[in-house]
Image (cartoon, rainbow, N blue to C red):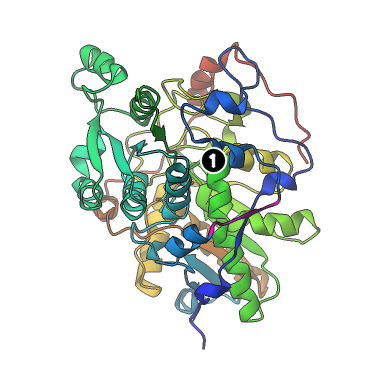
Amino acid sequence: MQVKVMLEENEMPRQWYNLAADLKTPGLPPLGPDGNPISPDMLAPVFPMNLIEQEVSQERWIDIPEEVLQLLYRWRPSPLYRAHALEKALGTPARIYYKYEGVSPAGSHKPNTAIPQAWYNKQFGIKKLTTETGAGQWGSALAFAGALIGLEVKVYMVRISFDQKPFRKMMMQTWGATCIPSPSPYTQAGRDILARMPDTPGSLGIAISEAIEEAVSDPTGQTRYALGSVLNHVMLHQTIIGLETKKQLAKINEKKVDVIIGCAGGGSNFAGLAFPFVNDKINGANIDIIPVEPSSCPTMTKAPFVYDFGDTAKMTPLMPMHSLGHGYIPPPIHAGGLRYHGIAPLVSHAINEGLLNPLAIQQLECYEAAVKFARTEGIIVAPETSHAVAATIREALKAKEEGKEKVILFNLSGHGLMDLVGYEKFFAGELQNYEMPLEVIQESLKELDGYPKPPAMTNA
Ligand SMILES: *Cc1c(COP(=O)(O)O)cnc(C)c1O
């Protein structure tokens, strides 16, 4: 009975897959503050031109540079597992597979894009990267990449996480990055907030503002900003997950996947596994492709397709995406991660074209599923990943009811060994379910009154 499928390094994909090349309708451009499409050179102070080219590329396949492959070999190709023990515990006729991205040194899929982003910046002559981090996963992934590639990395970490989650900060420090709590006294954005609210716990929006401000105001022009999800080039880099998975399934002669599942915050780990299969679906394959989000932050299942800012402080261009409004804050009882108010424009676009079937799940069901998974398969998953596990269990039980021998595949985006406090709260009975009322969402969306509206899209 085969438990895991491995690939040799020389079997790893040599190109990333760009879904933008295969969507029926063209993607909408991001807009500047004046409502006009922004041109690539307007992004030049923030990102290096080689990554901007990837961001706007319509090429279907983009070569992975040899030096990037060499660095990805540190942990890739990642294993594909068959969840025999979970199948048995559920008594399902379904075959369940998961791609395990927790084997990276930072513990999640995020280094799949941190490495190429750092590499392209280095190629462009950049010396230093700035970024923000919430729970610390992205900050530690970029710190790791900076160490391997030789770039200085500065991470603005949301104050409350900085105080409550010291381990991620220690990881960043170990990899040689500087991690400071945001808001900080080092930027104008930080000083303004501190003057008004000295005791603020901080927010991702404030941290993004600080990181961008530091990048664009470096007088030497050798600092840029890096983002860990949402953008097209991030989705692109993550497709190595799905491309490897296809080769692994072929190796064990598993010809057809029926259901594909990934958790979705900004959308990158989901897109990474799913987009190569979305291509099959566009070409006629019958696959149910399910991005899963928390009910307390229901971007894909309840939010309209709009133009909105990527951050609370409105520093980014307006992006075409499903959004709850850039000021949306999930309730504090939510411990499950995946708190972003929007979702990647490419994922939004695929939803609009009827290629995906998004799903929202409550956090108690997610933690129950994660505990069942830990006690059968052994891996303690990240709170974000628990959403994918819960959806997988639902699908496996459905297959049992229907007596169908389905093939279910999900992305295990990261382990939860740095996030055990969420589990502790779950066991202590301190977590609750929460369905975000429609009125709260409507109130948050009022902020977007007067913004440009995307043209109505045909919803298949
Ligand atoms: C950051 C993170 C996510 C959410 O981000 P996406 O861009 O939606 O993938 C999910 N799982 C893990 C383990 C993460 O670190």
Q: In this view, does 235 lie to the left or right of 440?
A: right
Q: Is residue 61 above or below residue 352?
A: below
Residue at the image point whose x is 25% and y is 39% from the top: 161
Residue at the image point whose x is 60% and y is 28% from the top: 40
Mark 1 lies on residue: 51
Q: In this view, does 20 lie to the left or right of 172?
A: right
Q: Is mark 1 within 8 Å of ligand 1?
A: no
Three-letter amino acid code at the position of disc 1? Leu
The reply to whether the magenta stretch includes residue 387 is no
From the viewer's side, name the closer residue of 111 and 340. 111
Which of the image's four quarters has the C terminus? top right
User: x, y (%) of residue 138?
Assistant: 37, 46
Image quadrant in which you'd find residue 187: top left
Q: Is residue 444 above or below residue 434?
A: above
User: x, y (%) of residue 412?
Assistant: 46, 61
User: x, y (%) of residue 121?
Assistant: 45, 42
From the viewer's side, name the closer residue of 188 and 305. 188
Image quadrant in which you'd find residue 405: bottom right
- Range shown magenta: 60-65
